[in-house]
Amino acid sequence: MPEITDRSVEKLARLIGDEERARLKIQRLRSLADLIESDVQDEVSIFKALSDPCRLAILKLLQNGEFCVCEIMIALDRPQSTTSHHLSILKDAGLIKERKVGKWSNYRLADGAVIEIMNQARLLSRLQK
């Protein structure tokens, strides 16, 4: 945990009027920041994966079942290399699962939480309008 400096205590103490309370608040904030930092990187990879329109389209397609790369590329009118690249990012983020059948790879959503994330995003976008 980073050291609590007199300068940071002084700044917060000026705002709240009590140096000891400021020191305790800073300790608590540093503990919370450490907890948050450990979770953030996993969440960042998920949000990055969700930030691309093609990847979102793939997820929406996979809501309807399991598909192989060739079906996904035809449905989205994308080259195989692009489709495979996006599938790799989604898989690395834990949003989809791959099932090998001979030389074919079939993809499906990892679990219901992916559908829930997409439903929540849809609701949030409607609230903005």
Image (tube, rainbow, N blue to C red):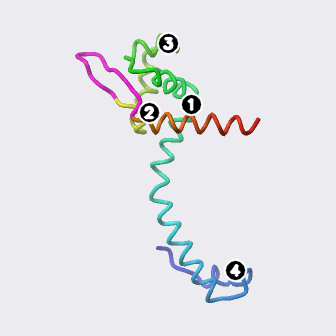
Q: Secondary structure at mark 4?
A: helix
Which residue position holds label 3? 75
Q: Amino acid at mark 3?
A: Ala
Instruction: Give the side of residue 127 with respect to residue 105, left or right.
Output: right
Which tag, 3 or 2, sits closer to the chain's start? 3
Task: Return the residue nearer the eye: 125 or 58.
Answer: 125
| Residue found at the far right of this picture | 129
Mark 4 neighbour density, 10 Å: few (under 14) some (14–19) many (20 or more): few
In contact (CB < 8 Å): disc 3 and disc 2: no
Image location (x, y in percent) of residue 29 = 56, 72
Single out the mark in the foreground, 3 or 4: 3
Tell me how far mark 3 sits from mark 4, CA to CA: 57 Å
Verify CB contact (< 8 Å) between mark 2 and mark 1. Answer: yes
| Residue 1 drawn above or below residue 77 | below
Hey, what amino acid is under mark 1? Asp
Q: Residue at x 41, y 21 (%)?
A: 65
The secondary structure type at the circle numbered 2 is helix
Q: Earlier in the sequence, mark 4 or mark 1?
A: 4
Amino acid found under the numbered disc labelled 2 = Ile
Identify the residue shown where x is 46% and y is 14%: 73
| Stretch in magenta | 98-110
The residue positioned farthest toward the left in the image shown = 102
